[in-house]
Every structure is written in C-alpha cells, then in structure tokens.
Image: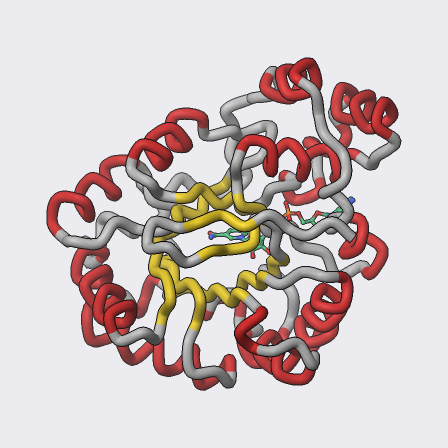
Amino acid sequence: MSSVPRITLNNGVTMPQLGFGVWQVPDDEAATAVARALEAGYRSIDTAAAYENEVGTGRAIAESGVPREDVFLTTKLWNTEQGYDATLRAFDASLERLGTDYVDLYLIHWPVPMFDRYVDTWRAFEKLATDGRARAIGVSNFQPPHLERLLAETSTVPAVNQVELHPHFQQEQLRTFNTAHHIATEAWSPLGQGKDVLTEPSVGAIGRKHGRTPAQVVLRWHLQLGNVVIPKSVTPSRITENFEVLDFELDAEDMSAIAALETGSRLGPDPSTMDFMG
Ligand code: NAD
C-alpha cells in the first residue's frame, strides 16, 4: 500500500494529506466508521464539538490498537463557545469527550464575524498551543479579511484553514492567499457531498481513462493541487475506495478539465454571513 503523503504545517508539525471526516455521523455509528477507517489505513480523523460524535470517535481510536501518536486528531470549537475563557472550557470538554489529553489540530469552526470574538478566541488557541495541548492550531471557514485581522492583531499564523472546496467551488483566490501566508488549505466536502460533482461527465470520462471511480478522480485532483482532504463515508467499500488514490496520477489535461468545472456555487453557508449559534 502506498503511504499517505504528509504536509508540513507552518510550526513544523506534519499532517496526513488524506484523512477521514465524520460530519453527520451519529455518535454510535462514528465509533464503527472511525474503526473501519483506521483499519483501511487512514491516520487522520476530523471531528468537531458540533458533530456530537467526539465520544464515539475517541473510543474508536482508543480501541483500535493504533498508537495514539500515530493518529492525527482534529476537532473544532463551536460558535457559541467563542471568547477567551469559554474557549478554554470548551477545549477541556472536547478532550474529555475524546478521551485524550491533547489534539493534533484545533480549529475555530466559523469566524462568525458579527459576533466579533474570533481574535479573543484565537488568543486562547495560542495558549493551548503554548501549553502543548493542541499540537497545531488553525481556523475553518475564514476568508481573507478574517485572516488579515488575526495576522495583524496576534502573533501566531493559523497552521490550517479548512474551507468548502471541491470541483464546483475551487477557492482559487483563497488557496493563493493561504499559500502566500504559509497556511495549509484543507478541503471540506471534498466530494461535493457526493452529489453533482461526482456525476460530471468529464469526471466520469477521466475515471474511465484511469480505471478509477469519480470519487477517486476528485480526491486525486485535490491531492495534486496540494489540498488536505477529509472525505466522509459510513459505507465500508467507499471508505476503502476513497483511500485508494495514492497509486495513480492525473495528467495536465485531466487537471484542466476539472479546473473548468468551477460554478462558483457553495453547498454550505457563506462564512461572512453565517451566524448560526445553535
Ligand atoms: P464529502 O464531500 O466528503 O461527501 C460525503 C458524501 O459523499 C457521503 O455522505 C456519501 O453520500 C458520498 N460519498 C462518499 N464517498 C463516496 C464514493 N466513494 N462514491 C460515491 N459517493 C461517495 O462531504 P462532507 O461530509 O460534507 O465533508 C467531509 C468532511 O469535511 C466532513 O465529514 C467533516 O469532517 C468536514 N466538514 C467540515 C465543515 C466545516 O465547516 N469545517 C463543513 C462540512 C464538512
């Protein structure tokens, strides 16, 4: 089996470029799905306090037989917990649910700019990093104005910006901004949530050319762009299929055919107006 490439983050910590996401997986099913993912070879797991499956995720890791230090574990701070003290409390609660004493990556889930607490929140993240309880700290759904503010007002550049990114929403400008500031780009909904992206005729044609499925083509495209990807599935065959993307290569013609699929339309909310506090 080819090994998963690792991305070196701006603090020197390395992160697998291919991981496994568990959004919308109920806690009891998360334990099974994460166990299957670890068996298939994934060593990076992406959860969040808001997914309400940190308990199942943590249990699967603990019971897997894979040493904790071989798993790259990400969780995220939910919007209602933003602010310095609330963040520190929320982090402790996440660790308790996960059953671990550190995370590899802690992300601010959304900027919620109208709430205006992400700078204070980030200062708490800096403390968690200094204390060694989060090996790396980053953000999710941050746009350049939100990142510019962190860069101007704090002293730690986020290691990662996890954003919606798939062939219909390629985030070219944001990727360029992230790269210029040594922020790794991580793609959420990398398969476009398994909807229209996977039925694009050109994705199907590229798959036939390489003897691969549409999902494998799309994941390969992400890897070749340099994105970190965290596809989600609870179906054992798809968990394996999504991991088998390390032993083939798209050519320049394939990459430009996928580049042409940009539609500019999001599947999720716009981070500048997203104010969901539930
Ligand atoms: P995704 O793009 O990974 O698509 C998952 C869906 O695609 C599955 O539910 C299934 O229906 C389908 N699918 C999976 N593998 C397939 C295959 N091989 N063939 C055909 N269909 C397949 O969508 P996602 O779950 O939204 O995103 C992945 C992860 O990103 C999440 O689980 C979560 O960890 C993270 N995420 C983060 C945010 C954020 O705000 N930071 C938001 C959404 C998702």
**Residue 121 image position (x, y, % from top left):** 23, 63
Q: What scheme was used to colour the molecule?
A: secondary structure
Answer with left or right where residue 54 lies relative to residue 92: right
* Residue lying at 22% horizontally and 49% vertically, measured from the top left: 114
* Residue lying at 68% horizontally and 76% vertically, measured from the top left: 31
Of the pair 255 and 46, the residue shown nearer to us: 255
Answer with left or right where residue 260 lies relative to residue 217: left
* 236 in relation to 242, above or below: below
Residue 249, quarter of picture: top right
Q: Quadrant of the C terminus?
A: bottom left
**Residue 277 appears in the picture as rendered:** no
Of the pair 6 and 118, the residue shown nearer to us: 6
Residue 149, quarter of picture: top left
* 104 in relation to 158, above or below: below
Q: Residue furthest left?
A: 153
**Residue 162 image position (x, y, % from top left):** 44, 48
**Residue 192 appears in the picture as rendered:** yes
Q: How many marks?
A: 0
**Residue 122 image position (x, y, % from top left):** 23, 60
**Residue 179 image position (x, y, % from top left):** 37, 34
* Residue lying at 20% horizontally and 58% vertically, measured from the top left: 117
* Residue lying at 56% horizontally and 80% vertically, measured from the top left: 55
Residue 270, quarter of picture: top left
Of the pair 67 and 270, the residue shown nearer to us: 67
Answer with left or right where residue 98 lies relative to residue 88: right
